[in-house]
C-alpha cells in the first residue's frame, strides 16, 4: 500500500482529525502521534488507538526524526503557522482545507516545501469522491458539450466558526471542484453575504465567478438553512449534470436535454427544445478520505501527483481572498 512504512503525526483531534487518523491507518500508514491541546480529546484518541503516542506538545512529534509527515486538522487560523513549523522541521505536510487564510501565506508554504523537496498538499476531499471523479471524466471526454454554467448550493444548519466566515468554511469544496473539472480559471469574482451574529462573521453568502469565455459559476453557502442541500448543476451545450451529494446512491444524473436557437425566415428568434433520457452512472463508493490519504502517501513515497495538489489549494485561497474583499465591499467585482 502507498502508506507502507510512513510515520505520520496528526495534529488536531476534534471533529475531522479522527477521520484522518482512521483513513491513514486504512491507507497502510502508521499514525505515530496524535497531538491536541485538549487532554480530553487525547484521552479519547488513546482509548481508540492505545499504541499511538498522544501529546499536547507538537514539538514532540516535530523533533522525532522517525516522523515523515504531519497532517494538520486544526482551525484554519493555525494552518499557516503549524504547516510552516512542520516544513521547517523537514516533514511532508497535509493541511486541511482551506490551506491558509491568505494567498501570500499559501505561496510562502509552497515555496518552502519546493525548496526543501517536501510534499505540501491540501485535503480538498471532494476531489476524491466517486461523484466528482465521474464528473471530471465526463467533462474531460467533452460529454456535456461546451460548458456554460456551474451552479452550486451548499447550505445547512452548520457549525458557526469563530475564525473564518461561511465562504472560507464551505466554498473551498465548490471552488476546488471547479478548479479540478475545468481548465479555465475565473477572471473576477463578486460576493455578497451577511452576518446575523454580533461577531460579524458572515453566515450566508453568494459568490459569482466570471470567466473569459461564456461560462459562469455561482455558489451559495450558508450555515443557517434548516435543510441540508448539497446540489450542483453543471450545464453544457448538449447535456447537464445534476450532482446531489445528499442522495445516498444516485448522486450524479446526466440529463440529455438541450436547446438550439435559430432564426426563421422573418428573422424571428426561435428556440427548439430537445428533452432526452436521464442517465445515472455507477460510481466508485470508496470513502473519499481513504483515497485522499492514499494520494498523500503516494505523493510522499512515490512522488506521484495528487489530484488535490498545491496548485489547486493556491487557486482556492486566492479566490477566497478576492471573494472576501468583494464581500466587505458590498459585492464589488474583484479581478483575480
Ligand atoms: N475536508 C473536509 O471535508 C473537512 C470537514 C470538516 C473540517 N475540515 C477542516 O478540518 C480542520 C479542523 O476542523 P474541525 O471541525 O475538526 O475543528 P474542531 O474545532 O472540531 O477540532 C480542532 C481540534 O484542534 C485542537 N486545537 C486547536 N488549537 C490547537 C493548537 N494550537 N494545538 C493543538 N491542538 C489544537 C482543538 O482542541 C480541537 O480538538 C479545519 O481546517 C476544517 O476546515 C475539513
Image (cartoon, rainbow, N blue to C red):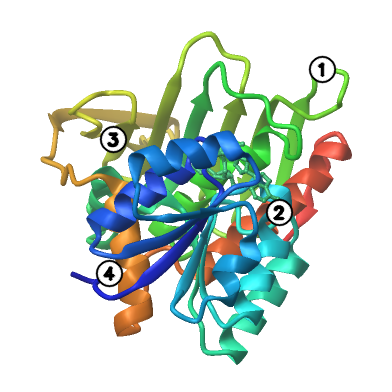
Residue mark closest to the camera, 4 vs 1? 4
Q: Cα distance, mark 2 to mark 4?
A: 26 Å
Picture coordinates of residue 138 (x, y %)? 23, 53
Report the quarter where the C terminus lies.
bottom right
Residue where numbered disc 3 is placed = 258
Residue mark closest to the camera, 2 vs 1? 2
The reply to whether discs 3 and 4 touch (Cβ–Cβ < 8 Å) is: no
Q: Residue at x 10, y 40 (%)?
A: 282
Report which quarter residue 281 is drawn in.
top left
Q: Cα distance, mark 3 to mark 4?
A: 45 Å
> How many numbered discs?
4
Residue where numbered disc 4 is placed = 3
Q: Cα distance, mark 2 to mark 1?
A: 23 Å
Picture coordinates of residue 253 (x, y %)? 22, 32
Residue nearer the viewer, 222 or 137: 222
Instruction: Give the class, few, some or many, for how many residues have Cα within 10 Å of label 2's Cα (few <14, many ≥20).
Output: some
Q: Is 14 situated above or below 52?
A: above
- CB of mark 2 near ligand 1 (< 8 Å): yes
The tag earlier along the polypeptide, 2 or 1, is 2
Q: Residue at x 30, y 38 (%)?
A: 240
Picture coordinates of residue 34 (x, y %)? 49, 53
Q: What number is the disc on residue 78?
A: 2
Amino acid at each position: 500500500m502507498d502508506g507502507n512504512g510512513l510515520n505520520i503525526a496528526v495534529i488536531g483531534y476534534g471533529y475531522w482529525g479522527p477521520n484522518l487518523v482512521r483513513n491513514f491507518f486504512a491507507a497502510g500508514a502508521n499514525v505515530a502521534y496524535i497531538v491536541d491541546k485538549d487532554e480530553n480529546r487525547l484521552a479519547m484518541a488513546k482509548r481508540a488507538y492505545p499504541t499511538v503516542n498522544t501529546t499536547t506538545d507538537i514539538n514532540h512529534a516535530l523533533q522525532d526524526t522517525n516522523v515523515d509527515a504531519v497532517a494538520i486538522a486544526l482551525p484554519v487560523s493555525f494552518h499557516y503557522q503549524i504547516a510552516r513549523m512542520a516544513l521547517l522541521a523537514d516533514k511532508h505536510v497535509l493541511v486541511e482545507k482551506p490551506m491558509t487564510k491568505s494567498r501570500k501565506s499559501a505561496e510562502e508554504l509552497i515555496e518552502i516545501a519546493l525548496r526543501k523537496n517536501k510534499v505540501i498538499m491540501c485535503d480538498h476531499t471532494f476531489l476524491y469522491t466517486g461523484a466528482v471523479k465521474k464528473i471530471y471524466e465526463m467533462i474531460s471526454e467533452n460529454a456535456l458539450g461546451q460548458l456554460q454554467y456551474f451552479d452550486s448550493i451548499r447550505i445547512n444548519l452548520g457549525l458557526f466558526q469563530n475564525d473564518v466566515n461561511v465562504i472560507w468554511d464551505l466554498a473551498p469544496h465548490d471552488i476546488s471542484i471547479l478548479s479540478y473539472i475545468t481548465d479555465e480559471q475565473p477572471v473576477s469574482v463578486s460576493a455578497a453575504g451577511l452576518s446575523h451574529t454580533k461577531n460579524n462573521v458572515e453566515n450566508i453568502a453568494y459568490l459569482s465567478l466570471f470567466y473569459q469565455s461564456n461560462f459562469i459559476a455561482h455558489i451559495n453557502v450558508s450555515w443557517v438553512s434548516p435543510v441540508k442541500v448539497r446540489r450542483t448543476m453543471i450545464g453544457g451545450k448538449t447535456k447537464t449534470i445534476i450532482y446531489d451529494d445528499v442522495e445516498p446512491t444516485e448522486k450524479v444524473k446526466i440529463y440529455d436535454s438541450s436547446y438550439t436557437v435559430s432564426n426563421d425566415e422573418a428573422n424571428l428568434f426561435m428556440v427548439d427544445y430537445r428533452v432526452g433520457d436521464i442517465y445515472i452512472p455507477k460510481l466508485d463508493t470508496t470513502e473519499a478520505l481513504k483515497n485522499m490519504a492514499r494520494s498523500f502517501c503516494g505523493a510522499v513515497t512515490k512522488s506521484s501527483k495528487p489530484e488535490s495538489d498545491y496548485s489547486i489549494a493556491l487557486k482556492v485561497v486566492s479566490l477566497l481572498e478576492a471573494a472576501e474583499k468583494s464581500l466587505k465591499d458590498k459585492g464589488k467585482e474583484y479581478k483575480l
